[in-house]
Image (cartoon, helix red, strand yellow):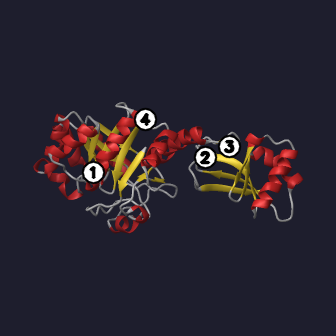
Amino acid sequence: MVLFVTGICPKDCFYCPVSNERRTDSTYANERKVISDQDLLEEARQMDALGTGITGGEPLLKIERVIYYLKLLKKEFGPRHHIHLYTSMAPDRETLKELSQAGLDEIRFHPPVELWDRMDNTSYADSINFAKELGMEAGIEIPSIEGADKMALFAESNGCFLNLNEMEFSDTNTDAMKAKGYTLRDDVSNAVIGSEEYAAEIAQNCEMIHFCSSSYKDAVQLRNRLIRIAENTARPFDEISEDGTIIYGHIECATSDEIEIVNNELLQMEVAPDMMGSTADGIDIAWWILEDLAETIRTQMRKMYILERYPFKDGLIVEKIPL
């Protein structure tokens, strides 16, 4: 699970992909806004989360919130629920000790680009060593761009891991990226040309290195999360696609009276009650049943669709096929 603690951040990294909507002091668990503890715990349960990545913004600007959530997650899911945190800050030993005691298992540092060539003389080197002394896994996580080779040497000499992410364009960083000369790899990806190849070169100088490609994040990480959520939340009549979306039929109704009329019609046609359900604007039903019955229940004003959407509450509809 991704726990986005706050969108506030003191840094101004030109490649930051965080959307303008998220750049506020709000907390999200995956796509769900966290208003209460229950929001967070329900999101973790519905995807059978084995761990949590705490991110932002800069989560350590709200360290009390971070510590609270660390304790909450560990209490609810136990010590095997692995929690890692991303930070662009270099916390002192006392802060790291507090985080460790609250349940943090791993910390990933994100130093500003201007420090990459002199990391040994910064407080980040001390923070990494403190974290390791306290029993946490510690490392660096940065985009795979020019200068990352210096970070590989630093990671190697300090016995920590290096995570490289393929550089990507987003709605919020496009202008800054273009101004620095970055270009898209192709027409079907947000990845920057040359970022993956650069990571392959760097890997020769670092033992503990991981590379996360743009396609992996989209095709594997997101897909697996959607499938886990869909398997835990799908209704009996929802079909789960291979991409983790859910597919079902929908009969649009203008009034509550119309919903009741349609519901009775379907029951008279011996549609099983667990194969349909009322919503605020109509009736959801197994798509294959609706396809079979569409001509029978059609009226001039009645609209029917096959919908495919993300398996979240009010999830994004990715396809809408009129019947």
Of tags 1 and 4, the one toward the viewer is: 1
**Residue at image mark 3:** 238
Q: Is residue 175 visible?
A: yes
Q: Is residue 4 above or below residue 135?
A: below
Decide which of tag 1 and tag 4 comes sooner along the chain. 4
Please tell me the numbered disc located at residue 64: 1
The percent position of residue 196, horizontal first and vertical second, equals 38, 48
The Cα atoms of the two marked residues, 3 and 2, are separated by 10 Å
Displayed quadrant of residue 280: bottom right
Q: Is 114 or 269 nearer to us in this picture?
A: 269
Q: Give the amino acid type for the residue marked by disc 2 in the picture.
A: Thr
Q: Give the amino acid type for the residue marked by disc 1 in the picture.
A: Glu
**Residue at image mark 2:** 245
| Residue at 13 percent of width and 50 percent of height | 123
Q: Is residue 197 visible?
A: no
Q: Is 246 or 270 nearer to us in this picture?
A: 270
Classify mark 3: helix, strand or loop: loop
The 10 Å Cα crowd at callout 2, few under 14, some 14 to 19, many 20 or more, is: many
The Cα atoms of the two marked residues, 2 and 4, are separated by 21 Å
